[in-house]
Image (spheres, rainbow, N blue to C red):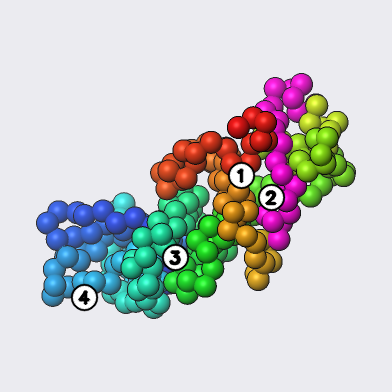
Amino acid sequence: MPNFTDRALLLKRTPFGESSLVVQALTERHGRVGILAKGAYRSTSRFFAVLDLVDTLELDWQSSPRAELCTLREGSIAVRRAAIPCSPRAFRAAASVLELTDITSRAGQPEPELFALAEGALDRLQRGTEGHDAVLARFELGLLRVLGLPPALESCAACAGEAAPVDAAGTRAAFSAGAGGRLCRACAEEARASGRRVGTLPLAVLADAQRLGQPDATSSPARLVKVRDFVERFLGYHLSVRPKSHASFLASPNRNAPESAE
C-alpha cells in the first residue's frame, strides 16, 4: 500500500470509537484526504495533542484502494498557532476559513493555491496585526478568485464597459450576484428583464474590496464590515449554501442597503 507525506490543515475532526479520530485534511500537494488516526486520544499515542485545528501539520499516511479512509502513520506540528484558540474572535474567524475550505475543496484533487490561501489567512490571524474582518474579507475574495468566480468590481460584468453610478448622488453602482458583479445601467436593465435580481452597492465599498487584493491595503473597520457583508452574500449565492460560520454575521439586515430602504 502506498505511503504519502505532506503538509496539511485539518478541516474537520470526528471521534471514532473510544479512542480514535477521523480527520478531513487539506494537504498541500495531494488535495483533500480522509484519514483515520487510530488511538489518537490515548496519551501514549504518537498522535496525541498533534491533530489540532488551525495548526499546519506534517502527516504521513497510508492509502488502500479497498478502504474509504487512509490510515495515519506519523504526525507532527509544522506550525503551531497557539494564539488563535486564545481569542474567541480569532478562533471564529479561523473556523470560517476552515469551513469554507472544507466546502470548496475536492477529494484527491491537488489544490496548492487553496492550501496557500487558507494557510495565509491562519497566519494573519495568528499574528493578530490585522483585524478579523479584513482577514476574512481578503480570504473570501481570494477564495472567489481561486474558484474562478471573482466579482466584477470596476467595470461591467456583462459587457466589460464602464459601469457608471446609477443613483442621483453618484455613490452607488448596479450590482448583481447572478450576473457576476457590477453592471452598467443598460446591462442592469437587461439582467432585470431576464429575471435576475439586481440591486446597488456603494462605490466606496467596491473600491475597498478592489484594494484588498493588495497585501498591505487597509480600510476603516466600519467599511471592512460592509465589504465582508457583500462578499459573504456573493459567496453564499455562488456556493448555493450559507456556511454555518456566516449565519450570525449575515443575520443582520444588508449593511449595504440604501439608507432609504433601511
The answer to whether mark 1 and mark 2 are in CB contact below 8 A is yes
Q: Foreground residue, 173 or 161?
A: 173
The answer to whether mark 4 and mark 3 are in CB contact below 8 A is no
Residue ID for mark 4: 46
Residue 196 on the magenta segment: yes
Q: Foreground residue, 144 or 248?
A: 248
Q: Residue at x 71, y 61 (%)?
A: 211
**For residue 236, above or below residue 98:** above
Left/right of residue 148 with respect to residue 89 in the rendered view: right
Q: Amino acid at mark 3?
A: Thr
SS type, badge 3 = strand
Q: Which mark is residue 230?
A: 1
Q: Earlier in the sequence, mark 4 or mark 1?
A: 4
Q: Earlier in the sequence, mark 4 or mark 2?
A: 4
Residue ID for mark 2: 205
Position of the N terminus by quadrant: bottom left
Q: Amino acid at mark 2?
A: Val
